[in-house]
Amino acid sequence: MTAHGYSDERVNVKVVLAASWVAMLFVFAYVDILAFFRADVLNAALDGKVKGLGVGVNQVFLVASLIYVLIPILMVVLSLLLRAPVNRFVNVAISLVYASTVAVSCIGETWAYYLAGSLVEILLLLFIAATALRWRRDDRPAGILGATEGRGRGVDRMRTGFVGETETPTHERAKP
C-alpha cells in the first residue's frame, strides 16, 4: 500500500507488451475505418484500387494485407506465451519493422487524422520496443522511465522451466 491507501502492483512485462499490441491494433483499425469516410479512398476502393499505392485489389493484395495484419494480432498472444529471451527479441524486431512501415505510409499523406493516428501507432510501437529492451532478468518490469522501484525485495518466485509455472523458494515455504 502507498501512503494514500492505494495498492499499485507492478504489471508483468508480458501483459504490458500484449496490451500495447492491442492498443496499437485498435488505432491501426480505426485509422483504416475512418479512411472510408474519405471520398478519394472510397472511390479508389469502388474502382478496385488502393488509393496512394496504385495497386489493384486482388487475391495477392488481400492475402498480403492479411499477413501484414495477422503478425501484430499474433504478437498479442506470442507476447504472453513466448519465453523471455525470444519474446524480447521478437517484440523489439517486429515493433521496429512495423514502426518503419507506418512511417513510410505517411509519406505524401496530408490528412491530419491519418498523421495523428500514425504518430500514436509509432509511439506505441516504440514503447513496445523500449519495454522489451528494458525487460530485466528478474521479470519485474521497469517503470515507464526505467525506474526500478521495489528493488531489493528479491525475486518472489523461481522459474521451473515452463511458461507460467513457478515454484516457491525453499526458504519461503510454510513449515508444517
Image (spheres, grey):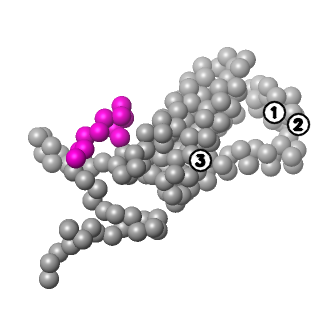
Q: Does residue 129 appear anywhere in the picture?
A: yes
Q: Quadrant of the C terminus?
A: bottom left
Residue 35 placed where, x, y %?
Answer: 68, 31
Residue lying at 46% horizontally and 65% vertically, measured from the top left: 163
How many C-alpha atoms fall within 10 Å of the one at disc 1: few (<14), some, or many (≥20)?
Answer: some
Horizontal and vertical percent for residue 16? 43, 46
- Front tag of 1 and 3: 3
Query: According to the image, label 3 marks what residue?
Result: 90
Q: Earlier in the sequence, mark 3 or mark 2?
A: 2
- Which mark sits nearer the N-terminus, 2 or 1? 1
Under tag 3, what secondary structure?
helix
Amino acid type of the residue that numbered disc 1 sits on in the rendered structure: Val
Label 2 to label 1, Cα distance in Å? 6 Å
What residue appears at the point 85 percent right and 40 percent down from the top-left corner?
A: 57
User: Cα distance, mark 3 to mark 2?
Assistant: 32 Å
Q: Residue at x 39, y 64 (%)?
A: 159
> Identity of the amino acid at label 3?
Val
Q: Is residue 12 visible?
A: no
Q: Is residue 11 above or below residue 165?
A: above
Among numbered discs 1 and 3, the one appearing first in the sequence: 1
Are the two marked residues, 2 and 1, in contact with CB atoms closer than 8 angstroms?
yes
Give the magenta range: 142-152
Q: Quadrant of residue 95?
A: top right
The residue identified by callout 2 is 56
Disc 1 to disc 3, C-alpha distance: 30 Å
- In this rendering, the answer to whether 52 lies above or below 66 is above
Q: Which mark is residue 50?
A: 1
Q: Residues within 10 Å of mark 3 (few under 14, many from 20)?
A: some
